[in-house]
Amino acid sequence: MIWHIARRELRGYLHAPFSYVVSAAFLFIAGVFWALVLDSYAQLAGQAEMYGMTDFGMLEGVIQPFVSTLGLLLVLFMPVVTMRVLSDEQGGGAMALLLSSPVSSTQVVLGKWLGLWAFFGGLLGVGLLYVPATLYFFGDPPLAPLLTALLGVVLLTGLGSALGVMAAALSSSQILAAVISWAGLMALWILSFLASSDGILQPLGQMIGLMNHMEAFGQGLLKSNDLVWFGSLTALFLFVAQQRVESHRWR
């Protein structure tokens, strides 16, 4: 039943014109930043070669800055897509009908989440296929850091999808759901800056800040604490969403 709900959710996004408008805007902006990153790398690589520096590679010059930029773009765009994932059912009064069928609230939440995650995976996998293609056509990038960076982006979309499901479960308004999701992702992003401060909140920024856990993936590093952070936070958001959906059953 979870896979059935996920497939139905994914088909809903693939048949919605709004999804293509948002996806086109996201891919256009990502393409512009990709061109800027490549141009900056070409200039810096030329200067490094001029001064005899041979340790400036694609990891530092291309993969790491683009992963950081892509992370910020996802933070800004994901709430626009996720805002309707459960709000339609709540706003149209279809939630009670859905839960009256032999489907558990856990199946509903996981199915919606997987459908969203699959949509973002397809968007990035197809729309940004030119990224590895360009790197391998013009150079010889390290494979392991590239795959690690990809894993970080995949985990971020899973986290953002879970937060979007939770936000949509908490509100029947699509706009409010988008605001809640966007505020949550931006809060996690802003907390990252506390890690570089000298105040008492520095440990909090290191522990919770989104970019502190994303930057290791961009550097080609796979750390257990980053995997646990993404997994725990995603599970927390899905649990809150499940509890909220379950509450509709007893109304």
Image (cartoon, rainbow, N blue to C red):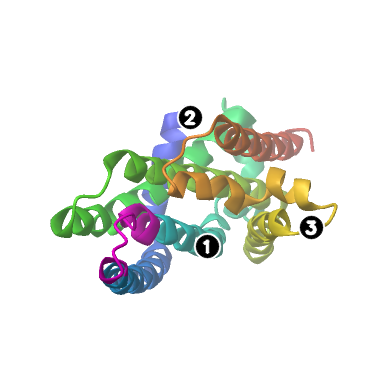
Q: Residue at x 18, y 56 (%)?
A: 139
Look at the picture and state if 213 lies above or below 23.
Answer: above
Look at the picture and state if 136 lies above or below 241.
Answer: below
Where does the image place residue 221, in percent across and percent down from the top left?
Answer: 46, 39
The numbered disc on residue 72 is: 1
User: Given the current orientation, which residue lies at the most extreme right position?
Assistant: 200
Q: Residue at x 62, y 48 (%)?
A: 163
Please, what is the three-letter code of the amino acid marked with disc 1? Leu
Please, what is the three-letter code of the amino acid marked with disc 2? Ile
The numbered disc on residue 198 is: 3
Is residue 84 visible in the rendered structure shown here?
yes
**Would residue 217 be found to the left or right of residue 14 on screen?**
right
Q: What SS does tag 3 mark?
A: loop
The residue indicated by pointer 2 is 2
Please, what is the three-letter code of the amino acid marked with disc 3? Asp
In the image, which residues are magenta? 48-63
Query: Alpha carbon of mark 1 to alpha carbon of mark 2: how far?
Result: 30 Å
Q: Nearer the viewer, mark 2 or mark 3?
A: 3
Q: Between residues 2 and 52, which one lies in front from this camera angle?
A: 52
- Judge whether residue 98 is colored magenta: no
Give the mark nearer the N terminus: 2 vs 3: 2
